[in-house]
């Protein structure tokens, strides 16, 4: 256990299936700091799942709530922020998160992500007919956005030990 005030937030970005949540949990435990997930907070606020929110009210509504959550979280310090994959689509979110945070992009190839996400029904973005092509397209579209992170961490391995160690090494003196 490491007890340390970083005076910064650790912000995890990346596509669905890149391991953000597991890595965020492991980091929170190691550093004994709080972890917040934008997805979980959106669901708590709306009292229903992301699938239901998107079905009932659409993506725009979901993105608005997500933005409000990002705004709220980015005012805090010394927390881990596990961002939904699409947080980077709003450039304002990036500015907010960067203010108090160090941003880590957890990168894995579309092939690796597809293998991990196959059969998952909780991600409305890939619930359509050809999830493999969809992941590939989203990866291509978002790569320039994710590349704005402070650090890129290789998250292709199923084990989270490597990425966790790498992030710790970047933030601890
Ligand atoms: C999304 C990713 C999801 C969730 C929503 C939209 C995206 O979060 O926010 O389904 O646009 O990439 P995870 O990346 O945590 O799966």
Image (cartoon, rainbow, N blue to C red):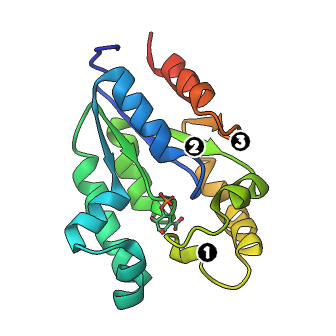
**How busy is the neighbourhood of tag 2: few (under 14 within 10 Å), some, or many (20 plus)?**
many
**How busy is the neighbourhood of tag 3: few (under 14 within 10 Å), some, or many (20 plus)?**
many
Query: Which residue is under mark 1?
Result: 126
* Label 1–label 2 contact, CB within 8 A: no
Q: CA distance from mark 1 to mark 3?
A: 19 Å
Q: Earlier in the sequence, mark 1 or mark 2?
A: 2
Query: Which residue is under mark 2?
Result: 105
Query: Percent from the top left, x then y, of residue 128?
Result: 64, 84
Q: Residue at x 27, y 59 (%)?
A: 41
Left or right: 108 as drawn, with respect to 91: right
Q: CA distance from mark 1 to mark 2?
A: 20 Å
Q: Is mark 3 within 8 Å of ligand 1?
A: no
Q: Nearer the viewer, mark 2 or mark 3?
A: 3
Query: Percent from the top left, x then y, of residue 45?
Result: 21, 68
Q: Residue at x 58, y 67 (%)?
A: 120
Left or right: 35 as drawn, with respect to 55: left
Name the image quarter holding the C terminus. top left
Q: Residue furthest top?
A: 173
Q: At numbered mark 3, what does the secondary structure look like: helix, strand or loop? A: loop
Q: Earlier in the sequence, mark 2 or mark 3?
A: 2
Quadrant of the rendered image containing residue 54? bottom left
Left or right: 104 as drawn, with respect to 153: left
Instruction: Please say if 129 is above or below 95.
Output: below
Q: Residue at x 35, y 31 (%)?
A: 28
Q: At numbered mark 1, what does the secondary structure look like: helix, strand or loop? A: helix
Q: Residue furthest front?
A: 119
* Label 2–label 3 contact, CB within 8 A: no
Q: Residue furthest bottom?
A: 56
Query: Which residue is under mark 3?
Result: 156
Q: Earlier in the sequence, mark 1 or mark 3?
A: 1
Query: Percent from the top left, x then y, of residue 16?
Result: 57, 58
């Amino acid at each position: 256990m490491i007890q340390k005030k970083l005076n910064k937030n650790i912000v995890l970005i990346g596509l669905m299936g890149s391991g953000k949540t597991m890595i965020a949990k492991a980091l929170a435990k190691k550093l004994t700091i709080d972890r917040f997930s934008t997805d979980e907070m959106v669901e708590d606020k709306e009292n229903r799942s992301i699938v239901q929110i998107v079905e009932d009210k659409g993506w725009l509504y979901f993105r608005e709530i997500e933005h409000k959550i990002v705004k709220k979280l980015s005012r805090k310090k010394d927390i881990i922020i596990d961002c939904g994959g699409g947080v980077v689509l709003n450039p304002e979110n990036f500015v907010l998160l960067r203010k108090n945070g160090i941003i880590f992009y957890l990168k894995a190839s579309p092939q690796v992500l597809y293998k991990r996400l196959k059969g998952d029904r909780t991600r409305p973005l890939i619930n359509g007919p050809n999830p493999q092509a969809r992941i590939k397209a989203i990866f291509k579209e978002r790569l320039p956005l994710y590349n704005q992170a402070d650090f890129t961490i290789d998250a292709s391995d199923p084990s989270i030990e490597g990425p966790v160690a790498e992030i710790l090494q970047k933030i601890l003196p």
